[in-house]
Amino acid sequence: MKLSFRDVSKTFRSLRGAVPAVRGVDFSVEDGELFVLLGPSGCGKSTILNLAAGLERPTSGEIRFDGEIVASLEGRVFVPPGERNVAMVFQGYALYPHLNVRENIAFPLRVAGEAREEIDRSVVRTASMLGIEDLLRSRPSELSGGQRQRVAIARALVRKPRLFLLDEPLSNLDAALRTATRAELRRLQRSLEVTTLYVTHDQTEAMTLGDRIALLRDGRILQTGTPRDLYEKPQTPFAASFIGPYTMNLLKTDLEEEGGVCSIRIGTERLPLPPDRASGARLLGSRKILFGIRPEHARAHPDSPDPGLRGIVTAVEHLGRETLVTADLGGASLRAIAGEGTLKEGDVARIAIPVDSIHVFPD
Amino acid sequence: MGEDRSFRDLLRGYSFIAPLVAILLAFVFVPVVGTCIDSLYREVTFLPRAFIGLGNYQSLASDPGFRQSLRFTVLFVLASVPLELVLGLSFALLLHRPSPARGALRACVLIPWAVPAAVSGKVFELICNFQYGLANYLVQRIGLTDGPVNWLGSTGGAFFALVAGDVWKTAPFVAILFLAGLSAIPEDLYRQAAVDRAGPVQRFARITLPLLRPVFVVALLFRTIDALRVFDLVFVLTRGGPGGSTTSLSLYGYDAFTGGDFGYGSAVSVVLFLIAFTLSVAYVRIGRFGRELS
Amino acid sequence: MNGERRIGMLHLAGAVAMTIFCLGPIVYMALTAMSHRPDFLAPGAGFAFTAAHFLEVLRTESLHFPEYFRNSLVVSGFSAAFSVSVAAPAAYAVTRLAIPGRVAVLFAVLAVSMFPQVSLVSYLFKLMSAMGWINTYAALVLPYTAWILPLSLWILTSYFSRVPRDIDRAALVDGCGPLEALWKVIVPVAAPGIFSTALLAFIFAFNELLFALMLTTDHRARTIPAGIALFEGLHGETPWGAVMAAATLTVVPVVALTLVFQRRIIQGLTRGAVKE
């Protein structure tokens, strides 16, 4: 099922005034795609999910399923959630506490009025798919967080929905379980080929799970693209710092021209730009820029006579596989991964920054 | 977050509330308004109903019986409410502490509340019986007095008996309120105080009492209004006697009604209603004010 | 540590005193009911067990005790049921359907609960007389239902507000219409709260006196509290044994309910009253 949002806005009216939660959001999800809505809390991603489900009505714009309008204020169309064949996994799982697992999973089928044998078969099939056949008699209160989540997923998938909605499903799990469940969710979604809308604030989840990601902030979509697009070509400083395993180094600095060579000032050091990058930078039109380099692209080496930027190490963090080094380059602080050799605080380090990996934004 | 509403949702919402509003209107609001209107009439059985404006109220003002019942009611409130609050708080403290008998103790404490006031009134009437009641038995056994006390035969004794009966019945309810308040106080505060080497009395004074203040205000209001409108206990235990000296305002109104004077009784009811209403409004004001302060 | 030990002893003493305080009158009541003579505490007299008073209360037709009992049960049962049935949808609407004026409704209902009964009863009497309902169940059930509504609404609102909103939403997404969601999901989840409310409503209705005194005239509709309040001996002097026997029998159902559902009752009362 192809989902599309066309210029959808949602404003909440309360006694305190109007709160625009979603502003002019435009995107589509292809059939079978796992589309991630990523952003900090309050950015409107959950509202978009609720709009897709029919739990909220849009204040303007259109929502279409396979080309047919399911919600439009101007067009006076609204298909209630029960009729959209949409399934949702809530952040707190929202299992029915008075029913056991089997009845929870069977609930949507019973509401739809299916035959008893059919329901039983579907429940067992879905439960096995999620590995919870043994829990069918238990009550939600007797289950662990991970088990409850599986029941919630089973309840959602049991009736083969057109659209599968997930609201931060992994946020209530502990770290170890999160990684394993993430992979399982992906596998499940791929095998079922169900169109999926997935909400999260965790960029790792988004990057590993999503076919495409929409980055949201303050109710607007800043950028849509594949994980790779967002990682390699962030269009805004916000996108640049939000995406990536480490927060990107972002420095307000100046472009300097000297003798035909364009350089970026970094503290007391200068990073010269090759001509193609230089012309791109000049196109920004101003001297003041925001310089970005991901820590994972920069390397900090012990001092050596080789050319490069120099800085004094102010912090060393051992993260297991990598060591993160913070260096002060005469007023500008940069974080980089340590290369060969050991560095400690106070040492002079040589920072290597590959020019192909730098990002330049207008200030 | 404000939620979405369509017209149909709104209609559904109001239809859910409608029966409740209808019943309250029909059987509470309209009767009160009706009584207020009645109070402006002279309405006595066998006499034609006539509008007399504030005539009933003027009679009330100069009626020694009314003034006596007003005095009694106020004194009753002043005597029993503080006792109930103190006793209720003590019970709550006892019930709050974990112990194996906690469930049984709580059930025990609930029983006076669950018993009808008519029954507890009769039981206390027996307890205060001059010849063989439990009260005189105990009082003489302990040696507090030489001879039996005529509880219900004297105004002071009857008053005392009523206060005792009321406190017995309502301290449990107050205890439950305070218990809820106590349970809401985070344990961490006490642990912190213990670390700071505060003794039990200090912990009580510095942590427990201040944090119980909102519950205290609620209990104070509920109990004051309930004590103002006391009827059941007074009717059964003393029937307003001796000589009408323990007639509460509610009972005074009731006597007027059963005596056939609906106009006068309505006036008494209105006075009581106004007193209760004023107190409720004062509470809401204080409550809102207090909330803004905190 | 000595301070803690002392507190422990104080606590024990206090608990014992509290128990004696609460149960003392009840025990005395039961003893008098079972005693051959009511003055069994007087010097010289003694306690001799007898069941005669109970039999007298239950068997003497002119006392009408079993009828009072029946009336009380019927009236309280229906009042509690109606009250909860009317209050539950209202509580649902107030907590979940964002209706303008819902807070006003709650406060108005609270204000209503502060009205003195005596300021309603004369008008109710006239109303019931006009309808010809004096001394019928209707005369009591309707005012009782109204009278208990504020309490029911407050307690149910508290219970409903604790049911997570996501459960409603899950039911909607799973295919329920709004009414279906209420019926199939919310009500079952809130069932314990509904039960507690009904219990409290029943107890309040059962114990009521003023309306019963004024709106009923004889055993056909009179309830137990009124019956006991008006208890008159056959010879003028109060037959304490019989009165206490009646009292004991009256107290049995309420005490039983309290003992069995003690936790629920406390929960309900707490939720209803400490609703800040």
Image (cartoon, helix red, strand yellow):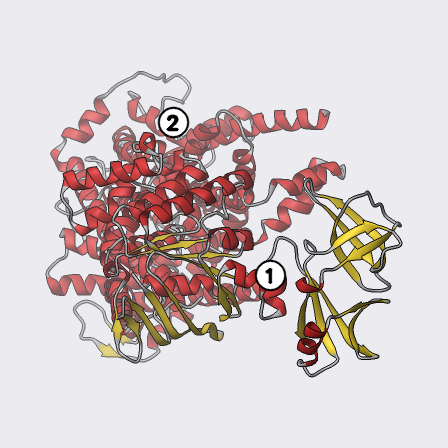
Q: Could you classify mark 1 by the number of other residues whose Cα lies within 10 Å: few (under 14), some (14-19), or many (20 or more)?
A: many
User: Which of pointers 1 and 2 indicates the residue nearer the eye?
Assistant: 1
Q: Where does the image place residue B183, in percent across and percent down from the top left?
A: 53, 42
Q: Secondary structure at mark 1?
A: helix
Which corner quadrant holds the C terminus of chain A? Answer: bottom right
User: Which disc number belongs to residue A7?
Assistant: none
- Of A348 and C25, the residue lying toward us: A348
Q: Residue at x 87, y 63 (%)?
A: A330
- Of A187 and A308, the residue lying toward us: A308
Q: Where does the image place residue C94, in percent across and percent down from the top left?
A: 35, 62
* Spatial CA span between label 1 and label 2: 72 Å
Q: Could you classify mark 2 by the number of other residues whose Cα lies within 10 Å: few (under 14), some (14-19), or many (20 or more)?
A: few
Q: Secondary structure at mark 2?
A: helix
Residue A210 horizontal side relative to residue C133, left or right: right
Q: Where does the image place residue B128, in percent across and percent down from the top left?
A: 41, 36
Residue B247 in view, yes or no = no
Residue C264 horizontal side relative to residue B52, left or right: right
Which corner quadrant holds the N terminus of chain A? Answer: bottom left
User: Which disc number belongs to residue A242?
Assistant: 1
Under mark 1, the amino acid is: Phe
Q: Residue at x 61, y 40 (%)?
A: B187
Q: Chain of mark 2?
A: C
Same subunit: marks 1 and 2: no
Residue B174 horizontal side relative to residue B3, left or right: right
In the rendered view, tell whether residue C127 sits above or below residue B157. below
Q: Residue furthest bottom?
A: A285
Q: Where does the image place residue A306, in percent across and percent down from the top left?
A: 85, 56
Residue A6 in view, yes or no = yes
Under mark 2, the amino acid is: Val
In the rendered view, tell whether residue A114 sits above or below residue C129. above
Identify the residue position indicated by label 2 in the image. Answer: C27
